[in-house]
Image: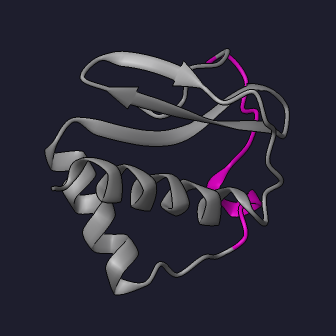
């Protein structure tokens, strides 16, 4: 569900992304967010122009910043950590 662009052509593949291994804390934050209806995913509407989208309880926002393939996964986990630390009281 993380892709919302034109489905008739492939705009990027997971092979285009640089590997990123999240820490245990980042995985804990991501798991907490997903259990609490907070999703962070890659949004791509042009070839290799990647944004991050955040969906909280059905409301979606797309970041205005674009990210390169070697930084987008790290940034995704930074968003998860941010929401985990903000809402996990």
- The reply, left or right, for residue 83 in relation to residue 19 is left
* Residue 50 picture quarter: top right
Query: Could you tell me which residue is drawn at 71 percent across and 61 percent down?
Result: 17
List x then y, in percent, for residue 52.
61, 38
Q: Residue at x 63, y 56 (%)?
A: 14
- The magenta span reads 7-18
Residue at image location 30% in from the left, 56% down from the top: 84
Q: Position of residue 83 (x, y in %)?
A: 37, 49
Residue 4 in the image: above or below residue 88:
above
Name the chief secondary structure element in magenta: loop
Identify the image quadrant of residue 59.
Answer: top left
Magenta span has 80? no
Horizontal arrangement in the rendering, residue 43 relative to residue 66 (left or right): left
- Residue 23, horizontal then vertical, whole percent: 43, 84
The picture places residue 6, in percent across and down from the top left corner, at 67, 15
Q: Which residue occupies 21% across, 35% down?
A: 37
Question: Quadrant where the N terminus lies?
Answer: top left
| Relative horizontal placement of residue 56, taking residue 6 as reference (left or right) | left
Q: Is residue 74 above or below residue 60?
A: below
Q: Nearer the viewer, residue 12 or 66?
A: 66
């Amino acid at each position: 569900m993380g892709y919302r662009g034109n489905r008739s052509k492939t705009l990027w593949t997971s092979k285009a992304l640089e590997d990123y291994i999240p820490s245990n804390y980042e995985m804990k934050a991501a798991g907490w967010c997903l259990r609490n209806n907070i999703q962070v995913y890659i949004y791509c509407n042009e070839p290799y122009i990647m944004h991050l989208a955040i969906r909280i309880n059905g409301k979606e926002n797309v970041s205005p910043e674009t990210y390169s393939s070697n930084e987008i996964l790290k940034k995704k986990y930074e968003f998860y950590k941010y929401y985990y630390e903000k809402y996990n009281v």
